[in-house]
Structures are given as C-alpha cells and as structure tokens.
Image (tube, rainbow, N blue to C red):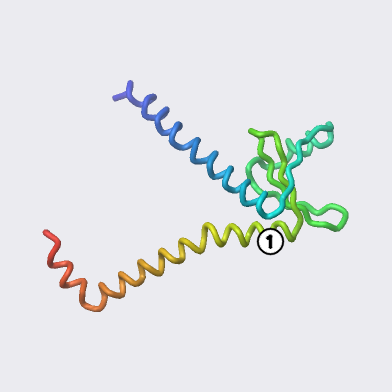
C-alpha cells in the first residue's frame, strides 16, 4: 500500500493542477473581455511591484485618487490592469457566466423538490428497491 501512495499523489496532482490553470485562464479571459489591459513588467520598479502582489488573485490599489484592480500571473509574467468600470464589467461577466447558470440549476432542483413534496415522493419512492 505504501508503494502506491506516491503514484496516487502524483495522479491527484496531475488532475488538480490543470484545473487550477484552467480556472486562472477563465478568470483572465473574463478580465480581458471586461477591458483589462495586459502589462508586462520591465523596469526594476515594475518587477518589484509585480513580485509583491498576491499571485493569481485580484488586488485593489489606489493611486493618485484612482482605484486600480490587478491580477498578477506569475506563470505568464504578466499583470492584468483595469479601473473601476472594467472591474464592474468583469463582475457582470462573472455573474452571467458562473452564478446565473447555477441559479437556473437550483430552480430546476427546487422544482423537482416541489413535485416530490406534493405526493409524488411516496409514489416514486415506492418504486425504488430498498
């Protein structure tokens, strides 16, 4: 059993890492669609700032009275940058693509629960072998 543990761990790692990458790719796609621009840090100051940011997460900063939202992708060595209006667009895209489909699914599930609660549960339940 112990000799299979590294194989299982490697298998799980190969399954989890692509999922993380695809999640980040999806987030970056939504940000670009919302109008975020891609910046490649080149100066020592930009590189230092890039390295100080939390990787693969959206960070909010205020500069010269303006709010900026940034996502640092260390694998691609890029920074996606947008303002308040781009971030608002991103949230709308995210809601439309990720949250709203889940709500539709929840409505369907609730509809099935209502049918079940209206007496069909006892009829359908009796058809399931115990």
Percent x, y of residue 56: 63, 42
Regarding mark 1 in the picture, which secondary structure is present there?
A: helix
The foreground one among 105 and 6 is: 105
- The part of the image, by quadrant, that contains residue 41 is top right
The C terminus appears in which quarter of the rendering?
bottom left
Residue positioned 81% across, 32% down in the render: 42
Q: Tell whether 87 sits left or right of 105.
A: right
Residue positioned 64% across, 33% down in the render: 75
Graded by Cα atoms within 10 Å as few (under 14), some (14 to 19) or many (20 or more), the crowding at tag 1 reads: few
Q: Tell whether 111 sits left or right of 53.
A: left
- The part of the image, by quadrant, that contains residue 21 is top right
Percent x, y of residue 103: 46, 65
Above-or-below relation of 4 to 59: above
Q: Tell whether 7 sits left or right of 13.
A: left
Q: Tell whether 41 sits left or right of 19.
A: right
The foreground one among 74 and 34 is: 34
Q: Can you name the residue that lies furthest to the front here? A: 33
The foreground one among 92 and 1 is: 92
Residue positioned 75% across, 59% down in the render: 84
Q: Which residue is mark 1?
A: 88
């Amino acid at each position: 059993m112990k000799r299979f543990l590294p194989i299982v761990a490697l298998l799980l790692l190969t399954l989890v890492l692509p999922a993380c990458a695809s999640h980040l790719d999806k987030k970056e796609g939504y940000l670009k669609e919302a109008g975020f621009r891609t910046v490649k840090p080149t100066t020592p100051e930009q590189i230092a700032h890039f390295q100080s940011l939390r990787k693969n997460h959206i960070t909010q900063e205020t500069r010269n009275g303006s709010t900026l939202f940034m996502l640092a992708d260390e694998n691609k060595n890029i920074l996606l940058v947008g303002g308040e209006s781009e971030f608002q667009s991103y949230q709308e895209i995210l809601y439309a693509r990720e949250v709203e489909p889940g709500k539709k699914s929840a409505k369907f599930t609730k509809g099935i629960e209502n049918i079940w609660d209206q007496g069909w549960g006892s009829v359908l339940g009796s058809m399931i072998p115990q």
